[in-house]
Image (spheres, rainbow, N blue to C red):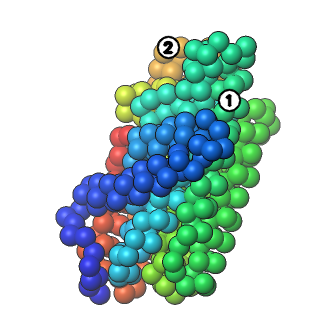
Amino acid sequence: METAGVLVRTGLSEYLGISKSDIQDYLTAFLERKKRELERVGEWGPDVSRRLEEFARRGKMLRGALVLLGADLFGRERDGEEVKVAAAVELMQSALLVHDDIMDRDEYRRGGESVYAQYGGLGRALGLPEPTHFGVSMGVCAGDVAIFSAFEILGTLKIGGRSLSSIMSLASKEMTYVGVAQMQDVYLGQSAGQVEEGDIYALYLYKTGRYTFSLPLMLGGLLADAPNRTIDSLARLGERLGVLFQMKDDEIGLFGNTEQTGKPCGSDVAEGKKTLYHLQLLRAAGSTDRKRLTHILGSRSIGNDDISYVRRLVVELGIRDRLEEEMERLADEAHAVADGLGDVDVSVLGIVHELVDFNLKRQM
């Protein structure tokens, strides 16, 4: 199938760049309108609109681009509505990250201060009596504004009733899954109980995987009126990509650096995140190493030597090699699902395959 009116592209990098530009232009215009609208509510309306626009701009806008990719796969003519959906997804992503940074107490995100940390600094500059609490409270509100604004955008879509209903229902359901999975993640981060691999894979799938890949691809497919069985295939493709993405994220979080990730190096170790690395380390380590690990994992006072020690153990115990093999298997499955999507634009399908390979090999 040939897609009429679709942007000329040479590959994934160019596609993502063009997509980000289109989404960013829409978000900038939308949030500029929100500034004027919310000014009558209070001074913080324009402030939060500006901060959300700047925060979104610093991101890659991958999820929004995947909405466009899902629509382009099935030959949907560009009419601007798909960019609205992509922008809404990016605002949902911003909301989740703003709240996630509060829960994880991460003061940096996307190469700059996290939103709640910005407000905390503002609280100190204003001489408020509880600037830290002020920052957290304002961050919660900012995330709320982002997610409700996202659904406001979806409500403006000029598409058929069934498609609009399906899009609203799917977005609401998947975001609910993320909320419950986040609660599970918070609990597991503080619990001393036994965690199984199935628990971790469920977190990877519902906290990150489905809303990062399945949701935007499915939304794009719905915009293009793809059949239900194809929407199901997009969900499966997204699940493989999503788990692979999260596993790679864990690897980069452990072995990367702050310049690459935009977050403090080793933050997952300090927070005691129940990742596959965490689980397999405790299973494979000897008694002496396990005793030291129990003092490191989840400790806010760890240093560079502790991070280096954890990295060395992961390599020496063969954990990194095993998980890399698992990521390669997921990539193979994703390629196979993509090839089974049926009558799609072959040039866009090539970008999907590039995306799979990028996920497997990315360093940031």
**Considering only order in the chain, which callout, 2 or 1, is on the residue closer to the N terminus?**
1
Q: Residues within 10 Å of mark 2 (few under 14, many from 20)?
A: few
x, y percentage for residue 25? Answer: 37, 55
Which residue is denoted by mark 1 in the rendering?
Answer: 136
Against 60, residue 242 (above or below) is below
Q: Position of residue 302 (x, y in %)?
A: 58, 16
Any part of residue 270 in sight: no
Q: Please, what secondary structure does the residue beneath circle 1 have? A: helix
Q: Residue at x 52, y 80 (%)?
A: 159
Residue positioned 77% across, 39% down in the render: 187
Q: Which residue is mark 2?
A: 305
The residue closer to the viewer here, 261 or 252, is 261
Residue farthest front in this picture: 40
Give, as a three-letter code, the residue at label 1: Val
Residue at the spot x=51%, y=37% of the render? 51
Callout 2: helix, strand or loop? Answer: helix
* Whether residue 76 is situated above or below residue 150 in the rendered picture: below
Crowding around mark 1 (Cα neighbors within 10 Å: few <14, some 14 to 19, many 20+) is many
Instruction: State the residue in front, 325 or 145.
Output: 145
Circle on res. 77: none
Name the residue type under label 2: Asp
Residue at the spot 64% in from the left edge and 55% down from the top edge: 148
